[in-house]
Each structure stands twice: as structure tokens, then as C-alpha cells.
Image: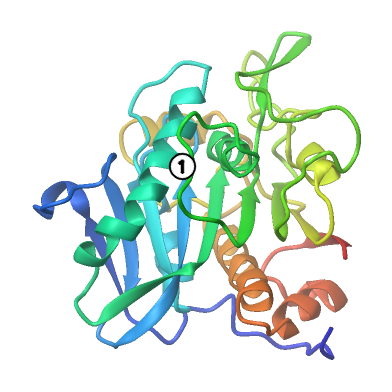
Amino acid sequence: MAASTTTTDVFLSGKYKTVLIDTSSSGLANPPPKPLLIGSPAEVAGEFPVMVFLHGYLMETSFYSQLIQHISSHGYIMVAPQLYKCAGCDSTDDINAAAETTNWLSQGLAAALPPQVSANLAKLVLAGHSRGGKDAFALALGKSWTPLTLSFSALLGIDPVDGLALCCCKFQTKPPVLTEGPQSFDLNMPVMVVGSGLGEDKKYKFFPACAPKGLNHVKFYEKCRSPAWHFVAKDYGHMDMVDDVTNGIGVALTCTCESGSSREPMRRFVGGAAVAFLRAYLGGDDRDLMALQDTPDIAPVQITVEACL
């Protein structure tokens, strides 16, 4: 590991201007299996790593536009498929749709990007939030019916959740991802898990916690093998990394989760931690990641850090 530094630029917007591309209105000759929101560097020629980002339960990809642009501004192509608009508890179809979207990238992504931008699919990352975090782990663990034609280089789970808590009962939703025993995930790639300190708390007495204890980020990290990182934002909630404004169902979804005082610091933290992780494991520069470990108060929120290296 390189010597750490106590300063980092990952929590600020990066050097690249970005563009958001909605493939549902782009008229592609080879359209993706699901509509995509793509965040890409713009106005500069270059080849950039790609992140497939899976949204949370009943969420729209547009709710993550500010997070997508933050990461993209640091030199990453973000590909966020709208896996569904309405769904039940079983996420099997989500996982298969994510696999189909991933396979499409090698044939169709180039036509969707700005003409001077190209995708480096040898540096392909998988990420997801909430149920999308569970779906990302499931896909990386080979739980899709659709065989993958591309390989992932890293995995990020943003407050992943593998089930529900109703009354006094907790249960995993299909297909179950959390398995018995520590370090049981055979992923063969670096993993970062981000958790919310308030995710386990109920906002209202008769509503379940959005990230219930025993099914959340803590258990996901426990199942990971080296190298794995675990960041927890103490005073922020399960939905605090989404956009400041989420219209329609987004209003209801964000209102049911306990939250911090403002989404902007949590969103900058999640985006910045992702960039630090990707710089380390895709770019070979771990200075920002080690700075977060050695001096966690450089983050815009109060965090705890664990690492299995």
C-alpha cells in the first residue's frame, strides 16, 4: 500500500464535464434490453471504465442522477438500467435483466456514448443500492439464469438489503443472497460495502426499517473475503444518497426511511468513496482510499471504516 495522504479531491466534482443520456429517447439501432440512464464524461476524448449501477426497490434511475454525475465527473461511464417500474418481492427477474444489460454493453454501448468517448469494458464494475445492492451481489455470485459474457473487476454495495422486516419477523426475499458462515461469498474481486447508520431505525412505528438489522450492510460485509472495505455513515439514512428532489413515488419512498439533516453530504460521501475505491483497484492508486482509512474525518460525514485486506 502507498503512503496515505490527508487530503483528497474525491468528494468534489471531478475534472470532466458530464452528460446524462436517456436511451429511451435516443433511437438506437441496437437498443438495450432495458432503458438506460447513462452518465458519461463529455467534451473530451478518452477511454473510461464502466460501472453498471442497479437502482433500489421501486426507484427510478433518474433519482440517482446527481450521484451518477459525481462519479462520472471523475472519469467513469455510469450505466443505470431501469430494471422495472413495479415489482414484487422476488428479484430474480431484476438479476436476469441486469445480466442481459451487461451482455449488451459490448455490442451496443459505443453507439450510445458521445462520439469521442469509448468504454473500457476490461475495467467493468458492478454496483447497486438497496435491493439493487442485493441484485448486484446476486449477479456477481452467479445467480442469474442468463450467463454473463463479460467479467466484473469490482463490486460496490450501497446499503444493500436482502429482505424485509415485518412486525417481529425478518425474512429474505428470493433469491436469498446472505448465506451461513462468515466470508462465504466467493467473489474473486475487491468489494466495497457502504452502510447507513440510521437504516436500521424505524421512522414511523407501523413502518418497517428500510435496512433491517440482520439483512443489511453489516451482514453483506461479513460475508466478503479479502479485499473488502466497509464504510458506515453514522448519522444518515438508507435513502440519503439519492437526488435532492425525487418526484412521484420517490417522495413516498424517501419519506418512509429515517434520514439525516441533508442528502448532499451523504451523496458526496458515497460518490467520493466509490471513486477512491475505483482509483485503488482499477487505477492502482490507493492514496485516497488509505487517506479515508487513516483519517476518516476528511469525509463530509462522520464515518467508521473497516477493511479486510
Query: Along the horizontal axis of the image, is 292 left or right of 175?
Result: right
Query: Along the horizontal axis of the image, is 294 left or right of 49?
Result: right
Q: Residue visible at 42% across and 61% down?
A: 68
Q: Residue visible at 23% across and 60% down?
A: 21
- SS category of the residue bearing label 1: loop
Residue 299, quarter of the rendered image: bottom right
The percent position of residue 182, horizontal first and vertical second, equals 90, 39
- Determine which residue is flagged by label 1: 55
Work out whether 297 lies above or below 257.
below
The percent position of residue 115, horizontal first and vertical second, equals 19, 77
The percent position of residue 195, horizontal first and vertical second, equals 71, 48
Q: Quadrant of the C terminus?
A: bottom right
Query: Along the horizontal axis of the image, is 308 left or right of 256?
Result: right
Q: Amino acid at mark 1?
A: His
Residue 103 visible in the current orientation: yes
Q: Quadrant of the N terminus?
A: bottom right
Work out whether 158 lies above or below 59.
below
Work out whether 13 lies above or below 184.
below
* Image colouring: rainbow
Q: Residue visible at 20% across and 52% down?
A: 23
Query: Along the horizontal axis of the image, is 191 left or right of 30?
Result: right
Residue 164, quarter of the rendered image: top right
